[in-house]
Amino acid sequence: MYFHLSFLLFLLTVCNVSAANGPVRYQVQGETFEGFFLSPIPQAPLILLVHDWDGLTGYEIKRAEMLAGLGYAVFAVDLFGAGVSPTTIEEKKQATSVLYNDRQRLRSLLRGGLEAARTQGGNVANGVAMGYCFGGAAVLELARSGADLKGFVSFHGGLETPDGQDYQAVKGKILIFHGTADRSVSMEEFAALAETLEKGGLPHEMITYGGAPHAFSVFGTDRYRKDADTQSWKRFAEFLDQTLR
């Protein structure tokens, strides 16, 4: 079970962690959000990490620590607002549907997260965005917006392209990890995205894992599949090494 960010903030305060590494409060269009920043060295390549539908929790913090251990700076963005931690299915659906129904707001919050990362010293010019489930869908939204990043990575994320959108403005490589047994995001959606990216001549790689359900990489849940998690993380680390300086 993972702690929510408010409790992590308390622990980091008690342990006197420096302001450069830990929770970060920032503003987007007058609203307060609370992300999390880690950087092993100044100007390390940056990973913008986007949370699942339960908000920024200890799961994302653990992944950020794993990435920092590989030498990357990480900014875990907050898309729901400081102190907002949905717990019930209804609350999670509500929090995400607001953003799915207002794509401009979603894009503004993602770009606000990038700016917050830059303010913390994150090397946005040498960065990749990645996300889990809802976060994976958000990362593809960021890609379609034309964000100037080198890569966009989705772990078991939503793959449907919204009406009226396309991938013509994408500037970086796209990497998709998907479970063949995912009942939330179909293989038809996976194939449709592959066809769209291929027709557009966009650099991409899309991998499926047999027997892996939706959210196959989330530790401590009945959906976790160690083989799919291990293999996808290995390929992700290789992708980062190949893509970032």
Image (spheres, rainbow, N blue to C red):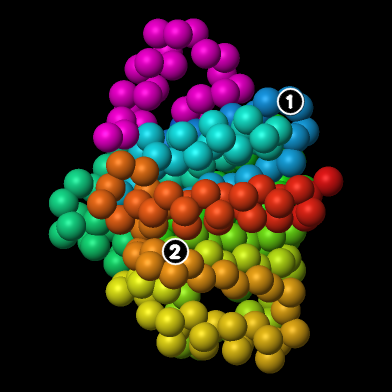
Instruction: Tell me the quadrant of the picture where the N terminus can be found.
Output: top left
- Residue at the image position 24 percent from the left and 48 percent from the top: 86
Relative to 199, 144 lies left or right: left
* Nearest to viewer (mark 1 / mark 2): 2
Look at the image and tell me whether residue 149 can be seen: no
Which span of residues is magenta-colored? 1-24
Q: Residues within 10 Å of mark 1 (few under 14, many from 20)?
A: few
Where is mark 1, residue-wise? 41
Vertical side of 106 occupied by 24: above or below = above
Foreground pick, 240 / 96? 240
**Type of the residue with mark 2:** His
From the top left corner, tell me how far across and down residue 245 is, in percent. 83, 46
Q: Position of residue 137 (x, y in %)?
A: 46, 66
Q: Residue 71 in the image: state x and y as whole percent.
A: 70, 33
Residue 156, numbered circle: 2
Q: Is residue 63 left or right of residue 185?
A: right
Q: Residue at x 40, y 60 (%)?
A: 133
**Where is residue 50 drawn, in percent x and y?**
49, 51
- Point 56% across, 35% down: residue: 66
Q: Secondary structure at mark 2?
A: loop
Q: Is residue 43 above or below residue 163?
A: above
